[in-house]
Image (cartoon, coloured by chain):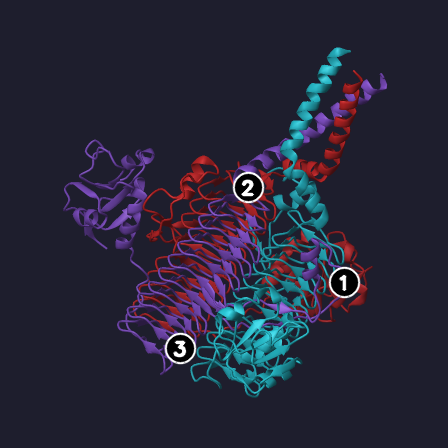
Chain colours: A cyan, B red, C purple
């Protein structure tokens, strides 16, 4: 992963200064950079670190004076954080999986494997599955019957893709991602306590113990292009129609997406988010870590939910929410301020009671 | 998966009307149904969808007029949602795993494999393990030493069953389920800050940094009949006695059941529930998504906990709870209403203070 | 796993009494103990159980009169809970994985495997990986390229160790642990709504829908000595520097540790904890189940966070916190008491308003 400063700047659509033929081998924080490293210094507040390290080259913020910083060369990008995308893509050493089809892989003869596909040790590819060109199927992956994966996919190890799942181009899955687990859908012979609680907001009526009958998942999962799914994240089959994830959506680790959920395009879900059954999420929705969304509700486009928000009702387009239950962020902050002052408020009320009762006794 | 209307109605204990020899091949939502599909229309509020699709046959709510709906045949079930159980079981195409023992599987010679068992590629079955008749052990499953799995189990791929785990009949496990991870039990040489906080409700006393000694898990996990465990869900071994899951209990994805927990029969736990060590949960308990239960407590039968409830104390039989900390749902709603009005209440108190101080100064 | 009472007492640094040559084969709760079991009775409040079982030998609390309890032998440890560490280590039957290198394992010829290492069926060990002496690599584990695992590791089944991960001595990983998933780091071409919300505390400004560009993970994960990682727990790569876990830290199931997080020594994280990107956690920190910590913050040494706390800001050394947002535990309890009394407080204010307005109208 060695490149000249010139080549990196060109790949980043950025400007290069100084000795642009210096070759850098890795990217480092300024204080830890060696002489062959590109120091990352896109924010002037970390400038002191540079003197602690031995970098000769840095990626700098716009307007930085690279010569005054004692550098031999520099790259300047207008939005340094965005430049990290192209820069880290160049420098990523990847998993170094062995190319080609490993002889230990078990591939059903009816599966269709595209050109230049890598299939790693102990991968299993089921009947009639189709793998797009240049895709990488990591070690211990299981691709179920009739599943379709588009071109340029990169599946790390231990990924499950269930039967009949359909996935677009450039899919990325981290270790242990589960696409197409059966939906959790059970029903009682008679109306259950939960159904009654939903009607009455808290009263389950006459308590009746019943057993659960399984509703099988007949739907599958459909995933768009450019989607990434985190480690050990689970996306369930739909009951009748497919569970759906739109194009460009990125999902972190340990997320739970239940049956029939529909997620739009370009969403970002942080770790441990959970979305209950049959909920619809719009486009460009950002959910912080540990956010939960109830079932059968609707989240509008461009909604942002702060970390650990528990969304119990629908949220209109563009709203920023926080809390349990989640409300508009400014409403939440007002409520919370009131809560912090509540012990004092209670004392004020007690004092008032005393004052008024005294004044009353004076009548 | 093609059946006549007559056969389906018979399997569902439902009534069939019209041309009951029409063959349907799949189940669809009314608006998306093709001519060979059974449209699901168990709720009259979705009746408009029927005109958008091409269904000739539908599963209808009791009292529906199938002829007025323009159908050629119909099935009417008294509780349509319950009929979904039998209907989806019939129509489920499953994972299409290859039948029989795959030659790549590694089965210890001392393991006992029942009749008509399927063992998929790269499954490992350890010493003295026993697999009941007609069970399916999916690809990449690991069944540990001395583990026992009853008849008619269906394990998807990548399932772990640890040594000495005992599981009843008709078990179902989704991809990546972990039965029998070691319990998380550590102890410090002297009383730890956590032990002191529990005694004092917040004061850890003199802070002393100590290292943790591991308590190994000598207990295993015992699971009853008709249990289902979701994708990437983890159930830990007990410390001395077994962790236990009762008959008919259904557990969703990414759930954490810690060491020594005892769960009763016919419970339903939604995604990302967590139950801490040594807690006992009764029968027919329903926990919404992301519910947490503290350690060493007791949840009565028929308790229902709303989504994201954090249960910090014991809950009596039949109670419906919500919130963090979880309290009775109506108490929670009262508290929450008060919280929403708190900014207004603070203003009212300020106005009162002004009025009273003014009236006081008039004295 | 059969030992004499004398040998056990010696291993536990405890005193033995009575017929110390009795051999015990397992450890039991008093009420369930058979004649060859060691009953665990380190707390006098469970003494009644002894009569229900058939134990001849027990592990007793200091000062217990073993003869009066009708026992033939006894072991007395000063802190019985701590003695459980050594006792359960002796009695643990383990997973009984077959010793040696299983012929089905795929080990890259450039990998370096230490002396007396066990590699189980279907394990994959990548190029240039190094496995320390006496380590056990369980079935279906994947050890990536250039990964280093120290001596005496014990990896259960289905564990992922990504390329370039470095792990110290005596590492333990439960089934499905993922060390070295790619960090979840995405950036938009222009400032995103989330970046604006962080500046404004709630206002995302003009809503602009953008797609996400991926920042690849160039950092790896570095883990110290004596660390344990729970089932299906995920630890992400760092972006530039490594994500780090200190010596002696123990992490439970389904925990999410994001990119760049630094965790100190001797921490204890319970199930389903989540720590967002670039946060630093000190030494001896204890986090209850389902605790969440926001990104880019700092948690001091010896902090204790109660179950389901959501930590939104930095926490000073030694503090005990609870709630969402997490605050000092006594502050939380005060606020919560106020919240419980809020409906009554509102009534008091209404009564005051009536009294004051009446007294006002008397003016």
Mark 1 lies on residue: C207
For the residues labelled 3 and 2, the Cα–Cα distance comes to 46 Å
For the residues labelled 1 and 2, the Cα–Cα distance comes to 46 Å
Q: Position of residue C285 (x, y in %)?
A: 45, 51
Mark 3 lies on residue: B104
Label 2 secondary element: loop
Return the disc, 3 or 2, that comes first in the chain's sequence: 3
Mark 2 lies on residue: B302
**Mark 1 chain:** C
Say the numbered circle drawn on residue A119: none
Q: Position of residue B238 (x, y in %)?
A: 38, 50
Labels 1 and 3 in the same subunit? no
**Mark 2 chain:** B
Labels 1 and 2 in the same subunit? no
Q: Residue at x 20, y 46 (%)?
A: C9
For the residues labelled 1 and 3, the Cα–Cα distance comes to 54 Å
């Amino acid at each position: 992963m060695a490149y000249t400063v010139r080549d990196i700047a060109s790949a980043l659509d950025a400007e290069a200064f100084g000795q642009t033929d210096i070759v850098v081998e890795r990217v480092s924080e300024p204080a830890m950079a060696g002489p062959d490293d590109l120091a990352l210094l896109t924010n002037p507040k970390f400038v002191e670190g540079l003197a602690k390290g031995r970098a000769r080259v840095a990626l700098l913020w716009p307007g930085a004076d690279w010569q005054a910083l004692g550098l031999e060369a520099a790259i300047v990008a207008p939005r340094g954080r965005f430049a990290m995308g192209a820069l880290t893509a160049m420098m990523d050493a990847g998993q170094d999986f062995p190319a080609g089809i490993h002889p230990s892989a078990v591939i059903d003869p009816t599966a269709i494997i595209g050109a230049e596909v890598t299939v790693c040790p102990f991968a299993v590819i089921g009947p009639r599955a189709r793998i797009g060109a240049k895709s990488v199927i990591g070690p211990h992956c299981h691709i179920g019957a009739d599943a379709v994966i588009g071109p340029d996919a990169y599946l790390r190890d231990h990924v499950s893709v269930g039967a009949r799942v359909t996935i677009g181009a450039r899919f990325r899955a981290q270790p242990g991602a589960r696409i197409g687990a059966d939906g959790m859908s059970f029903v009682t012979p008679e109306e259950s306590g939960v159904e009654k609680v939903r009607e009455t907001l808290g009263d389950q009526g006459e308590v009746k113990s019943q057993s659960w009958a399984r509703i099988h998942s007949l739907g599958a999962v459909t995933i768009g292009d450019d989607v990434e799914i985190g480690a050990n994240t689970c996306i369930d089959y739909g009951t009748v129609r497919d569970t759906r994830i739109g194009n460009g959506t990125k999902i972190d680790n340990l997320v739970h997406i239940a049956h029939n959920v529909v997620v739009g395009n370009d969403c970002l879900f942080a770790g441990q988010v959970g979305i209950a059954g049959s909920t619809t999420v719009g486009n460009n929705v950002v959910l912080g870590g540990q956010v939960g969304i109830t079932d059968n509700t609707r989240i509008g486009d461009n909604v942002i939910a702060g970390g650990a928000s528990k969304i119990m009702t629908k949220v209109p387009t563009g709203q920023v929410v926080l809390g349990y239950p989640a409300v508009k962020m400014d409403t939440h902050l007002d409520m919370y301020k009131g809560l912090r002052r509540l012990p004092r408020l209670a004392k004020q009320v007690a004092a008032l009671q005393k004052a008024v009762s005294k004044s009353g006794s004076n009548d």
